[in-house]
Image (cartoon, coloured by chain):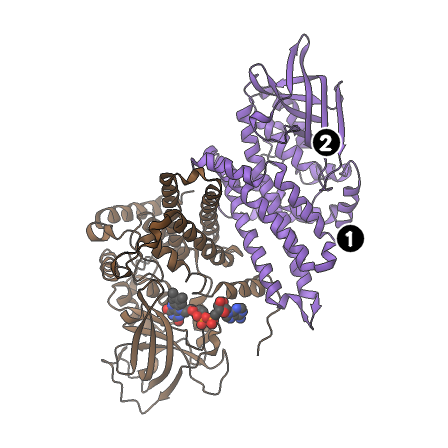
Chain colours: A brown, B purple
Amino acid sequence: MELDFGPAVRDFRDELRDWLAEHLMGEFAEHRGVGGPTDGAAWEVRLAWDRELAAGNWLGVGWPREYGGRGLGLLEEIVFEYEYARANAPYRATGNALDLLGPMLLAMGSEAQKKRFLPPILSVEELWGQGFSEPGAGSDLASVRTRAERDDGGTSFEGTSRPIGVESGGEWVVNGQKVWTSFGIHADWLYVLTRTDPDSRRHKGLTMLLVPADQPGVEIRSIRNLAGQDEFAEVFLSDARTDADMVVGEVGQGWRTAMATLGIERGTTLLPQQLAFEREAEALIGLARERGALDDPMLRRRIVDAWISVRIMRTTNLRTIAELTAGRAPGPQATTAKLYASTRHQQLGHLAMELAGPAGQIVDEDYALDTRQRSFLLSLAETIYGGSSEIQRNIIGEQVLGLPKEPRP
Amino acid sequence: MDLTFSEEQDELRKVVRSFLTKHATEADVRRLAADPTGYDPVVWRRMATEIGLQGLAVPEKYGGSGFGYVDLGVVFEETGRALLCAPYFATVALAAETLLRCDDERARGDLLPGMASGETVATLALTEENGRWDEAGIRLTAHDKAGGWRLTGVKTYVLDGHLADLLLVAARTPSGISLFAVEAEAPGLARTPLPTLDQTRKQARVEFTNTPARLLGPEGAAWPALERTLATASVLLAAEQVGGAAAALDAAVEYARIREQYGRPIGSFQGIKHKCADMLVEIESARSAAYGGLWALDAGDETETAISAALAQAFCSEAFTKVAGDNIQVHGGIGFTWEHLAHLYLKRAKSSEVLLGTPSYHRELLAARLGI
Ligand SMILES: Cc1cc2nc3c(=O)[nH]c(=O)nc-3n(C[C@H](O)[C@H](O)[C@H](O)COP(=O)(O)OP(=O)(O)OC[C@H]3O[C@@H](n4cnc5c(N)ncnc54)[C@H](O)[C@@H]3O)c2cc1C
């Protein structure tokens, strides 16, 4: 099934194809297919590639022009992701800001925030980290304890110049700890879920703050993930400061703001991941053929099942995209897709490792992994981040099927 | 891109669902399951005359209304949901499709209008004692005698074979697999209903003894057409399986909301809640498998149809069985009774799993079609 949305979009697609053919060269081409939402491999090259994309004005295809985007529609965004994945270009290092923070600011940010923060995202001048999780608040995100207090004496801002340049007459002082911040060591800024009403409980009294990372009150230490990469980090906030107008949404309404970023993952962001899974499945079939594994009926069956899985992921995704582009509310498959994809991708990883045989046990110097090993190990994160599989099942059970909620304290 | 349903298709779904809610109630299903003929001729006629279900995807020139496969898929999803007891799958998904694919314009003109109008109940007789759905499984022979073709041999597991007015029969002639039409009244035709595990869908054994038959299409050239029919029917069966699974999940969810243990609805326990969530994941994935096939059919893409048909049967068969089994589990003891509907879905699931070939068989077909 090919996506085709008619002539106007076709021109856009051709322009993009030509551009990719011309620019995905040299070092960039060598890093085709590298990366993923949690893969820190080849960070510098990928960052350079993001800048190349930025120079071609390919980031933020759907964002308004006034903030540096192309001002095009959902169709073009989808076509972009699709062609991008088809070209197997390196996974964008700045995905976090592009897919999560940017849309959050577009939806709930102030005009000043949009003007200040969106253009440097699209030009890859500022990198962002998401500070939601805490040591004591993972799945139960509403139990965040990182505190933020107003300091209206407010002349002590120690960062660079005032971020927005508005005389705001105050600052926030932030204390607490965040953890599992993806690519946190690279972050220039953090968007942080904080508790601003010390007496509040759970979803109430939370506030979303934009906090500069480059200041004495912010310490970021990388944590090695199971693949040996410095991919995520822990963040210590000790009297960290940010300007009073760095609140996204309203004070006390941080939960709403957070949910807007964590809401149903749109088909556009799932699409590239699934095309990557497809490519893995194809490579696996090739490997199986080479090894003569297709003659083994048990393996053959698992290989066919792997193929079935990636095909189903793709159709599920296309259903969601078709609904979105038809202006319809996405059906339940938009919610079940993550659970299915993450589970099946892990099975694909196990199968690939089995086919690799003894060679799969050997790594390079400094624990350098090949694509297959990395993909297998990193797939273990897919059932944890972005809402673990158990939490996904709770969401499906309660929000889609309408089953009674779990008793809560 | 039409990977989503149109408003007309949503409307069609509503109409079919509301018709079936009235005319294929739980009581009807139980009554007809126990009845040897297995369907209600009055409802059958109303399906044809009031909403045109039999002729929905039959081209207008043969008396149908010329809708596409996505539309037909919507109907099968609903008949599956309702466990409709009627020779609908046999007539529409097997017999009408066979005619549409076989190279015989005259036969189409003669036979399709009756099916579209609901006057003719028809079926396809392909499987024999060996239970196979491939070319090699067809052994029944046809002889060209003075005065026309005659069939001798046995077909079995023939859907609604005991009541069909018209049987389309795959047989072997000296030049290969050929297709024949046999009238219900033909001499030398003996039909025995088979007691079925799934009582909501009847089957028969059909014996031919020198039975006169009409050759459809060129002699010896029927297999490709039959293969395409089976692919189409596989996709339509998948849609029916999705509907059945969705109904089973609805029942499980409804029960989980009201049944209490330990002072709480069982649906608030993760053991049950997560099971229901997993059922939905299966169903939505099965939907993708089935819809992919319907879209390929409407796009007229034969390679893609062949691939997605095998995929749909490999996946949707197991998904339905899994969900139907989980529905019984969620219901506990009551789910294990004859009185509760849950077992009817399980039995429908288990027998539709093998109706057009087992999931393993379809995996092999898929592998072959992909060159794996
Ligand atoms: C690779 C990676 C990148 C990440 N990046 C970021 C990031 O950039 N920013 C950020 O803020 N966070 C990030 N996270 C954190 C992620 O959101 C959390 O790990 C996730 O929400 C789970 O929280 P937890 O790790 O505290 O596990 P816990 O919540 O303690 O869960 C442990 C286990 O208990 C289960 N469990 C928990 N609650 C329930 C329940 N109610 N019912 C049933 N089972 C339950 C979970 O499913 C899990 O299996 C990242 C995580 C990973 C793995």
> Residue A165 is drawn in which quadrant?
bottom left
Q: Which residue is mark 2?
A: B204
Q: Confirm whether residue B305 shows in the render.
A: no
Q: Chain of mark 2?
A: B
Amino acid identity at mark 2: Ala
Task: Report the front residue among A283 and B352.
Answer: A283
B354 vs A192, left or right, is: right
Q: Which residue is mark 1?
A: B339
Residue at 74% from the left image edge and 36% from the top image edge: B45
Q: Chain of mark 1?
A: B
Amino acid identity at mark 1: Glu
- Rendering quadrant holding ligand 1: bottom left
| Callout 1 secondary element | loop
Against A162, is A349 above or below?
above
| Callout 2 secondary element | strand
Structural distance between the alpha carbons of marks 1 and 2: 26 Å
| Label drawn at residue A271 | none
Against A335, is B170 above or below?
above
Q: Are marks 1 and 2 in contact (CB under 8 Å)?
A: no
Residue at 56% from the left image edge and 39% from the top image edge: B235
| Position of residue B281 measured from the top left corner of the image (x, y, whole percent) | 54, 55
Q: Looking at this rendering, what residue extends furthest in the bottom direction?
A: A153
